[in-house]
Structure formats: structure tokens, C-alpha cells
Amino acid sequence: MLRKTIEIATPGTRLSVAHRQLVIERPDLPKATVPIEDLGVLVIDNGRASYTQAVFIESLAAGATVIVCGRDHLPAGMMLPMEGHHALTERHWAQVEAGAPLRKRLWQAIVKAKLRQQGRLLAQVTGQDAGLNALAGRVRSGDTDNLEAQGAQRYWPRLFGRAFRRDRSADDANALLNYGYAIVRAACARALVASGLIPSLGVWHRNRSNPFCLADDLLEPWRPIVDWKVYSVMQDATDPKTLDDRPTRAALLAIFNETVLVGGKRWPLLLGIEQSAASLAKALMQNDRHALILPESLPLPPDLLDDGQG
């Protein structure tokens, strides 16, 4: 089922639950309702919003992720469902006991997929992939040559211009990238928990203060899809876009409506992430890096979605 992403940004909005419906009451606007079962991601981006405890309980019970944003509109925290996978303990042990060779091979596959995605995006917007596809073919187990960083040096100036620097504290395109990465990271964390994995125990990322290391691992090959969305938003704009602009945030959240190829099949982005997370669990359970499936395309254009194929 394709779940919805709902952003709450109108000042003074009140959220409650009645008859398995999320009730949204906004000042001077008609009351709106959304079936709880349809929620995938609930983003609350207003300090004056109020909500009953049932909003969180019912949303999480339905498998949704709840994201609360700060004054800068960036996610300040998220709540994930605690309902366990039917093989939760078994998968936890497989994750804990995964050896270094398997973890290095999985990271190799993740870096390869990321570089190929970056190459696809550059080819789409500049006509050339800057050698990123060839670079992906040279990634070794554990990315010992740090080709991921070498790819970034080619990628960013070609995508956003020579003056661009990836700076998490900047207010330009970087702020839009931060927002997009944060919401997709939340979706990765949700999918990993639903697949019975521990989100803090990474394949490659290791940080004693990071509770979502595994989500950061899984996020990497999905980042270029966020880059694609940010590039598209900026190209379509006549004025500079910031996170203070609600339509800009709405455009970024619409990324979950895009369709991508994962494992040779078409999936809405949110479901595609779930497929990747489930395949990562399978790879850990079977000690088989080949079980991991990752995005194989940028968002597909509408003309490729009209032939009725699944």
C-alpha cells in the first residue's frame, strides 16, 4: 500500500484521532481527516501545533514515522514504531554477529550504487557522468581507496557549480539537501526497524552518539535522488528557495511520490526503501552480500509509468 506523507505547518493546527482517522483542525479552514492506516510519514513543522497523545500512539501502531521539526524547519527528532518483526531476535543476532568481510562487501555495494546514481544524475543534467560509473567499477571491499570521497569531488561542482561546497551549516542549496536527507533518513530508519534490524548498529558508519548508524549506511545510495529533487526545485525557481518557503518544503516531501527501480522492479520511493531494508536483513541473515538490493535509477519520468507494468 502506498502510504501518505503529511506535513503539518499551519500555525495553531490541532491534531487528534477519532474513529481511526487523524483529525486535522486548522484555524479558518475546514476540518480534514486522513485514515491512520494510510500514514507513512507525519511531519510536524510548527511550534504552535497541538496534539493528543493518541496521535502518536495510533500513528506509531499503524507503522508510521512521526518527525518533529525545529525552528529551522529541519527535523529535530523522530519517533519510530516499536512493534517487532516476527524474527526480531534472530535478525538482531545475525546483525551483531556479521563479520568484517560481509560488512565490507555490503559497504562496497552501497558505495558502488551511490556513485552510479550520482553518475546518472550528472549524465541527465550535464550530458556526461564525469567518469563516476567507471569509478564505481573500481570500488573494492570496504572502499579502501575512498572512491566515495573522490566521486564527491567530481560530483558537487558539476551539479551545483564550481563555487558550491557541501556545507551542512550553509543556507543555500545545502539547507534543502539537509532537509531532504533528513526525511529520507527517517524513512530508512523506519524501514530498518520494520525489517527487524537495530538502527544504531551500522554496517560501516560508527559513532557512539549516533542512534541511526545503519540508517546512514542505507541512506547513501538514496542521497542522489534527494539531490535530483533539490536540483529540480532550484531549476524551476525564479527566486532563491529556502526552507522558510512552505511550497519548497512540500516539493521536497513529494519525493516520496516518485517511482524508482529497486531490484529490477518499480516501486514508489517509500516502498523501495522498504525493499532495500528487507534485502539488507536478508543479506545479514544469509551472510550473502548479493542479497542486498539498492536503487538502480533516478525517479522515472511519467511516460515510463503509463505502460501498466508493475
Image: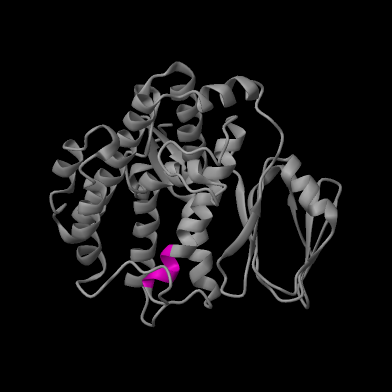
Q: Residue at x 45, y 34 (%)?
A: 276
Can residue 306 be seen here?
no
Residue 11 falls left or right of residue 281 = right
Q: Residue at x 39, y 60 (%)?
A: 229
Residue at the far front in the pictured view: 208
Can residue 156 be seen here?
yes
Q: Which residues are magenta?
A: 173-177
**Residue placed most toward the observer, 20 or 273:** 273
Q: Report x, y in % for residue 95.
A: 51, 27
Q: Is residue 148 above or below residue 201?
A: below
User: Which quarter of the rendering shows the N terminus?
Assistant: top right
Dividing the picture into quarters, in which one does residue 103 lie?
top left
Dividing the picture into quarters, in which one does residue 191 lie?
top right
Q: Report x, y in % for residue 121.
A: 26, 53
Q: Is residue 25 above or below residue 241?
A: above
**What colouring method underlies this structural image?**
one colour
Q: Is residue 176 magenta?
A: yes
Q: Is residue 270 magenta?
A: no
Q: How many callouts does the rendering have?
A: 0
**Residue placed most toward the observer, 168 or 9:** 168
Q: Residue at x 21, y 66 (%)?
A: 157
Dividing the picture into quarters, in which one does residue 113 lie?
top left
Q: Report x, y in % for residue 213.
A: 49, 45
- Main SS, magenta residues: helix
Residue at the far top in the pictured view: 286
User: Which quarter of the rendering shows the C terminus?
Assistant: top left
Residue 126 falls left or right of residue 261 = left
Q: Residue at x 34, y 38 (%)?
A: 110
Q: Report x, y in % for residue 176.
A: 44, 68
Residue 15 falls left or right of residue 257 = right
